[in-house]
Structure formats: structure tokens, C-alpha cells
Amino acid sequence: MDLRKFTENLLILTIYMDKVALGKYGEDLACEFLKSQGYKIIERNFRIRGGEIDVVAQDGKTLVYVEVKTRSQHMYG
């Protein structure tokens, strides 16, 4: 998905989506990107005593923990 299409989708979705749905959309995009880079998705929304890990992936022999932050605007970085 190119950046322009992503931005258009994000704008449309933020009008209609609540924060939970927006977060899930961001996690879906992150997983799509990781897979395209050769990562294997092991688990999503893995709950532990101290909180939650959004995505657990594997890159070869390396386990990768991913925290996803989805913005609805381009402000603040």
C-alpha cells in the first residue's frame, strides 16, 4: 500500500472509527508490513501481567516485540 492510499484510508477511517478500531487497523498494517519484510507473526495482543504486547514476531532466530502507535493526524512527529 503506498503512502497516499494509506493516508486517504486513515483519514476516512478515523472519521468513522473509535480508538479501539483505529488501533486494530494500525496493528493490521504493522503486521502486513512485517510480513512483507519476511517476519513471521507469532502472536497479536499478547497479554502479560504488566500489560500487553501488540505484536510478537520472529525474524530468523530473533524474537521481536512490537508496540504499535497509530496516529490519526500528521501532527507531533
Image (cartoon, rainbow, N blue to C red):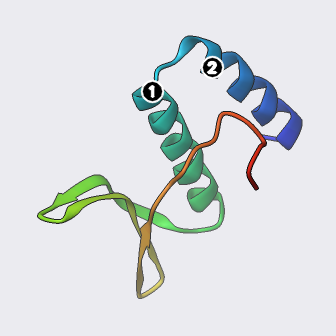
Please, is residue 52 above or below residue 66 in the view? above
Q: Earlier in the sequence, mark 1 or mark 2?
A: 2
Please, is residue 58 above or below residue 49 in the view? below
* Spot occupied by residue 12 in the image (x, y as percentages of width and height): 70, 16
Q: Which mark is residue 13?
A: 2
Secondary structure beneath disc 1? helix
Q: Which mark is residue 21?
A: 1
Q: Nearer the viewer, residue 69 or 32?
A: 69
- Taking the spot 46% from the left edge, 29% from the top edge, the residue there is 19
**Label 1–label 2 contact, CB within 8 A:** yes
Q: Quadrant of the N terminus?
A: top right
* Spot occupied by residue 31 in the image (x, y as percentages of width and height): 52, 52
The three-letter amino acid code for the residue at tag 2 is: Leu
Q: Quadrant of the C terminus?
A: bottom right
> How far is disc 1 from disc 2 in space, using C-alphas?
9 Å
The three-letter amino acid code for the residue at tag 1 is: Ala
